[in-house]
Image (spheres, helix red, strand yellow):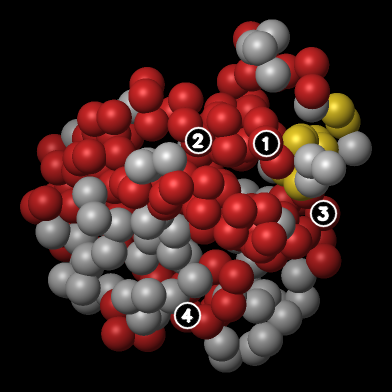
């Protein structure tokens, strides 16, 4: 029997998520090769290589923005966030833990001179800590908007996101609940020779499926009929 998984306010069959990943591999081979690379993160933070890789995710960074990111990276608290940090381990209810450290690193760039956009920051930070930071582009933000707003109101920390929406806890809840589904996807991908996809973090696999499913819903794609609002 096919298992379902929850994606924001949408329920999706797990086999369609796996198929969405395979379709992405066929249509976005350059992105997987150059943006994701080896998926190991960047111990040196934001480097010239990281900035170059971000271009393959359509991060349209101006020279001013690149300068702002590089300057901020020099004083960023990288040592507070392990290279292999995972979003599933970042409990927003645990004061002084990984979630707070991740938020401090993220806020460091939001507050930096130059005011680089939040989407660009998430696109770049994902490359430095690929298991921790989701890529928050317009598609992801739109799909998770309601859940993220509810998560923001539920937060008890004194410093909450400026946007009024807490996307990380909402995405984290779905990823954690879908642990078995993600493990099954990874096994299927490895078994079919899609080793590049199989080695990606849970956060990145979730990002890919989110984009593909959202696109199917918007464009009445071949598996849109199997998606139902939960």
Residue highlighted by disc 2: 21
* Residues at marks 2 and 1, CA–CA distance in whole angstroms: 10 Å
Label 4: few (<14), some or many (≥20) within 10 Å?
A: some
Q: Disc 4 or disc 1, which is closer to the eye? A: 1
Question: Left or right: 50 with respect to 230?
Answer: left
The picture quadrant where one finds residue 158 is bottom right
Give coordinates of residue 203: x percent, y percent: 51, 55
Residue highlighted by disc 3: 150
Give coordinates of residue 157: x percent, y percent: 69, 77
Give coordinates of residue 72: x percent, y percent: 23, 64
Q: Disc 4 or disc 2, which is closer to the eye? A: 2
* Residues at marks 4 and 2, CA–CA distance in whole angstroms: 31 Å
Give the number of marks. Answer: 4
**Disc 4, SS:** helix
* Residues at marks 3 and 2, CA–CA distance in whole angstroms: 29 Å
Which sits earlier in the primary sequence, circle 3 or circle 1?
Answer: 1
Mark 4 and mark 2 residues within 8 Å of each other at the beta carbon? no
Residue 101: assigned label:
4
Question: Left or right: 223 with respect to 126?
Answer: right
Which sits earlier in the primary sequence, circle 2 or circle 1?
Answer: 1
Which sits earlier in the primary sequence, circle 3 or circle 4?
Answer: 4
Residue highlighted by disc 1: 15
**Disc 2, SS:** helix
Which sits earlier in the primary sequence, circle 4 or circle 1?
Answer: 1
């Amino acid at each position: 029997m096919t298992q379902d998984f929850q994606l924001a306010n949408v329920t999706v069959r797990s086999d369609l998520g796996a198929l969405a990943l395979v379709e992405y591999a066929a249509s976005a081979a350059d992105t997987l090769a150059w943006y994701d690379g080896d998926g190991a993160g960047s111990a040196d933070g934001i480097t010239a290589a990281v900035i170059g890789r971000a271009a393959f995710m359509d991060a349209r960074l101006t020279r001013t923005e690149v300068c702002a990111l590089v300057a901020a990276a020099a004083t960023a608290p990288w040592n507070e966030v392990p290279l292999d940090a995972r979003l599933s381990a970042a409990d927003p209810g645990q004061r002084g833990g990984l979630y707070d450290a991740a938020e401090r690193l993220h806020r460091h760039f939001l507050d930096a001179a130059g005011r680089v956009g939040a989407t660009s920051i998430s696109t770049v930070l994902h490359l430095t800590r690929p298991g921790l930071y989701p890529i928050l582009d317009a598609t992801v933000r739109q799909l998770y908007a309601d859940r993220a707003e509810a998560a923001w109101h539920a937060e008890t920390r004194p410093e909450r996101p400026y946007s009024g929406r807490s996307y990380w806890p909402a995405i984290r809840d779905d990823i954690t609940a879908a642990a078995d589904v993600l493990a099954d996807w990874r096994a299927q991908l490895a078994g079919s020779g899609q080793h590049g996809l199989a080695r990606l973090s849970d956060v990145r696999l979730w990002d890919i499926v989110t984009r593909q499913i959202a696109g199917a819903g918007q464009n009445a794609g071949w598996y849109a009929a199997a998606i139902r609002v939960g």
